[in-house]
Amino acid sequence: MNGTTIGVIAVVVVLIVDVVLLLGLVTMKAVNRRRAQSYKLRRAAYVATLSRRLTSRAASEPIEARAAADDAFLDAVIDMRNIVTGEEIETLAGIVDGLGLARRQEARLRSRFPLGRRLRAAVSLAEIGDETTATVLIEHLSDREPEIRVQCARGLGRMQHTAAIDAILERLGLEEPWVRARFADTLVGFGAKATWPLVAYIRVNLRHHDNDGVVEAIRVLGVIGDREVGPTLAGVLRVASDPEVRIATIEALGVVGGPLAIGPLKATFRSTDWRLRAKSATSLAHIGDPSVNSLLARGLEDANWWVRRNSAAGLASLPGGADLLLDAVSSDDQFARDAAAEALADCGALAAARERQEAGLTNAEDRLLLAHMSGQVLT
Amino acid sequence: MIREILLRVGYGTLVYFIGMQAYMIGLGLRSAAVMRRVHHLERFGRVSDMLSSQTSPPVSIVIPAYNEAAGIVDSVRSMSIVGYPRFEIVITNDGSSDETLQALVEAFHLERVRIPYRPDIPTAPIKGIYRGHGAVDITVIDKENGGRADALNAGINAARYPYALCTDADVILDSNCLVGAMRRVVEDRERTIAVGGNIRPLNGSKVQLGHLVEAGVPRKLIPRMQVLEYLRTFLATRPAWSQMEALPLVSGAFGVWKRSAVIAVGGFSSGHMGEDMDLTMRLHRHHVDNQIPYRIVYEPSAVIWTEVPETLRVLRRQRIRWHRGLMTAVKDFMPMTFNPRYGKVGMVTWAAMFMFEYLAPIIEFIGWVTIPLAFILGALNTTSLVVLLALAFGTGLLNTLLALLLDESYGYFNSRADTARLVVMALIENFGLRQITVAWRIRAIIGGKRTRVWGNMERKGVANLGVGSP
């Protein structure tokens, strides 16, 4: 076989593949177009049927059994589930049960279907599942597919299935960051019910080398905001050596710590690690006690830029802090000056000074601030 | 003797061409596997859960602007409603000679402020900083002219958050683009230093109030050809590069960068015509040389729309600028090329960039000269000539069709008219238009260096691309 023959064969093969792909493309576009149109019509029809069933239970318009196998019906049920309230939820649950919709999705989830169908099943169960579905969802918290694990946790959170909290926490430290973040969102959704399981989890896992789960659990406690965990977190701050754990704890203490957290936070504000100092400045300000004003004012002269900035922002939010910031506007340190000015602008002091200027009522502090903002230097 | 040389050169270009197409098709097939998974996650995965999450990392959207008075306000308004829980917008007015700054100040009620600006990356002098206190944090850095890279650096200096989305003033962001890109950051916050997005031509689409309402294929041939080019690049190439964690380029129109990493390598290079490629490659080099674990990835679901040139004159200018940027980058990073120390970047993606992007116009040009000459001098018979041309056409078409099939997962361009336009374009782009772009790239090589730091593209502007735009 000479070169030309090989070339001809190659051309024929390539052109055949081209024709197949071209026909495939045109067909796929036509099919997708029709499928999308048909799906929209079916979904709208199902929404209309379900609406009639829910609003007038007497007029029991039948829903064909084959609808249970139609994704358009499933999406219509999910749409309705998100908007109905009261008795209508019960009626819709009855329809879902009657058609075996959840059971069908459970079977899909358990099967070895391709990813797309299993994922759809998990999403559907997360939306329409009830207590009877919880076992399947808990079982799949360790599914091989991360997104399915996320959906199962979401579903358990939606149905507020408290028995799932421990199951989710068991996986928290083992998960990849994306799934861990979504699990954390679910735990936040459980609210105060998750507080003590989270505390127990932190106590058990704190001294382990892999602290990713503990960091996330502490963040969740901060977001839930249950003040009863303040002493526990203050204890964590005393014993933890991992900077990530300490940073997360400082942040959470700003929310849940209250006055008792001021002492430990003052200690971390003196840390050699600038990240701890910066986070402590923010948390101290969050607590809202003006007794830390002088400490934060010292933070305006910190060697690290973020500590100065957070200290300034913190002072702006505290009673009496604005006076200290105005003092800092005439500081020798340009960054401290600018950080103070930025914080004063953010807390509305600049706008107030401008208003007084327009009314001809400016005082010395206003003039200093306005001059600094406009770039002039007052001597 | 001459016939023999011509024949050998001709076959040499053929071997090169087959290698290039095999590489492209290989990438396309690998991208298909990646895209299939992305498609499922896009349809059923709840990336949007990040919208309500209190742990989503905040982002600074950095927009460089030079003489953008006509469209900047609409662009910023459009960007300010992007779906993301916590972000700020930092606009750098790079010494515009028009009313860009005034337009922003008036529209967003900005006031001149002093904020602690850290010149972590040196830039042209800052003239003033303006900030608004509306629903979205908007900061405008007014500085002396220094070019796009310099403007981006000033924006990165002023950004308050650890990640910066660097984009352009004339793009439309898909509402989920930031969530899609930041998902990749959340997946691996320690190692992820840059995430590239999927850029698509806006021409031919329907836009209302700065938002895309319907994607469409442009009627004009030049932007339509670019639709295919963008699909080949962003759907059939980058997903595969990204999966290898060897992405050699995060495009300037959409890139989420970790601020600390960008600052560590000195920011974008001012005066560089391919500042996005330059920064991406410097980040690779810095992290490999210093043995810092990292990854630079691409997210196909992070879609943004940009206006592409509609005339040959503007397209020519753009392509010459792009190729000069590539030439500079190839020269700067030559020690990384085929260097196993740099792993897949050195041995695969950057090596391929050198072989199939930098050298392509030269070798293709040689092919276009020697093959007809060999045919005229009788060194190549008619059958061989037809085979060569058919192979070139067939493999090029295959690559394009693969990209179009991958695009099906997005559900755009499904009308009969759009399908017909795309198919016709796929069939005809190899007859003339491709050769013209090769000629421009040759022109870039022989034309020497001329620095133009702001690409002077004529645009209609986001707000002016109304319903029924071509």
Image (cartoon, coloured by chain):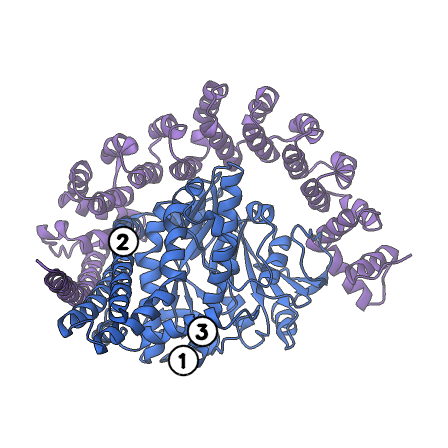
Chain colours: A purple, B blue
Nearer to us of marks 3 and 1 is 3
Residue B14 visible to an observer of this rendering: yes
Q: How many marks?
A: 3
Residue A87 sits above or below residue A146 on the image:
below
To the question of a shared chain for discs 2 and 3, the answer is: no
Q: CA distance from mark 2 to mark 3?
A: 61 Å
- Position in image of residue A129 (x %, y %): 25, 40
| Residue under numbered circle 3 | B443
| Residue under numbered circle 1 | B312
Disc 3 element: helix
Residue A166 location, quadrant: top left
* B74 left or right, relative to B224: right
* B211 left or right, relative to A93: right
Front residue (pair B4, A135): B4
Residue drawn where x is 41% and y is 47% of the image: B338
Nearer to us of marks 2 and 3 is 3
Q: Amino acid at mark 3?
A: Arg
| Residue under numbered circle 2 | A80
* B326 left or right, relative to A358: left
Residue A282 sits above or below residue B308 on the image:
above
The subunit carrying tag 1 is: B
Q: In the rendered image, which quarter contains the N terminus of chain B?
A: bottom left
Disc 1 element: helix
- Position in image of residue B383 (x %, y %): 13, 71
Residue A252 location, quadrant: top right
**Residue neighbourhood size for the residue with mark 3, other residues' Cα within 10 Å, grouped as few (<14), some (14–19), many (≥20):** some
As drawn, the label of residue A154 is none
Nearer to us of marks 2 and 1 is 1
The subunit carrying tag 2 is: A
Residue drawn where x is 60% and y is 61% of the image: B270
